[in-house]
Every structure is written in structure tokens, then in C-alpha cells.
Amino acid sequence: NPSILVIGRCGPSLSAPTALSFLDAYTGKELNSLSLAHTVARVIPLPYTDSTEQRLHLIIDFNKHAYLYPRTPEASEILKHEFSNIYWYSVEADNGVIRGHALKSNCIHEVVDEYCFVFRDLWSIVFPSESEKIIATVTRKSNEVRCLWF
């Protein structure tokens, strides 16, 4: 059955402990849950699934680290194979900045975490605050077909 990823913060603070819960989409039964040792600033669903058809996600924390979920060897192998093809962007509406990012390398911590990555900024667009303002952003749906015309 398809599963749903639910992310919950245990308190109003951005640094409050966070928990992940995977639910069966048909029954609502909890399949797995875990508490995170890091913050959650953003969740990026990747266009890849494992052999159980569970979608891979990158969870970005406030320290600019990206964590792969699910934390399985199979997911890690998929990410290693697609490492150079993973890009995303972020929007700082208050500052009028849009940035493009890509994975750079594994995190360097005291304890090795093969599911933690640092990323780099590839590009940025800065809108002049005196004449431009970002009021909304929208991403395309993951199942939306994208046509390229040459």
C-alpha cells in the first residue's frame, strides 16, 4: 500500500524536537515512527522510490544539512546513484532571494552519518527590494508532465 510521511514538531519553537511517522495510506495504521536529532526547515520529496515503493525524501535542517529518509542501505544506494541529479531551490520571500542548491558531500561530524549531506548554492536571483517583491511561489505537481520544446 502507498504510505504517507507525517512530520510533527513537539512544540512551537523551530528547534523543538521533531518526529517522523509513516502511515499506511489506506488504513491509517502507523508503519514506522522515529524521533529526529535535528531540526526540520524543509522537506524535499525526491522523484525516487525504493523496492517497497516508498518515496525518498531529503529533510533540510536549519544548519544547512540534508538528511535522507528512509534511512536504509537501499535508499542510500539510490541516492548515491542519482547524487549528481538532485537539485532544489529555496525562496527567501522577505529578502527577495531565490537560490538553487545541489548536494555536495557527506556531513563531517564526530559520528559518521552516511545519511547526512551538506549542500552548496549553485545560483541565486536577488530582486531589488525597492521595486520587486516575492508575494507567492508555486511548484509543479510531482506527477505533472513537463514538455520541453526545442
Image: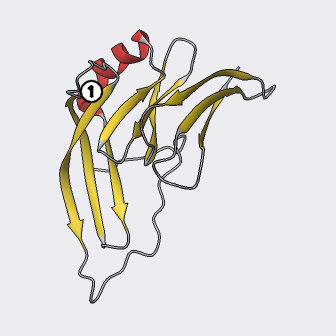
- The quadrant in which the N terminus is found is top right
| Rendered location of residue 77, percent (x, y) | 34, 13
Q: Residue furthest right?
A: 27
Foreground pick, 10 / 25: 10
Residue 132 shown left or right of residue 120 in the figure: right
**Residue 135 drawn at (x, y percent):** 45, 76
Q: Residues within 10 Å of mark 1 (few under 14, many from 20)?
A: some
| Label 1 element class | helix
In the rendered view, would you say 120 is above or below 91? above
Name above or below for residue 137 compared with residue 22. Answer: below
Residue shown at 31% from the left, 83% from the top: 132
User: Which x, y percent locates residue 10?
Assistant: 60, 44
Residue shown at the point (69%, 27%) measured from the top left = 23
Q: Is residue 85 left or right of residue 56?
A: left
- In the depicted view, which residue is nearer to us: 106 or 127? 106
Q: Amino acid at mark 1?
A: Phe
Relative to 92, 36 lies left or right:
right
* Residue behind mark 1: 83
- Give the residue displayed 38% in from the left and 70% down from the top: 93
> Can you tell which quarter of the image residue 98 is in?
bottom left
Above/below status of 63 relative to 75: below
The tally of labels here is 1
- Please name whichever residue, 12 or 56, is drawn nearer the observer in this view of the structure: 12
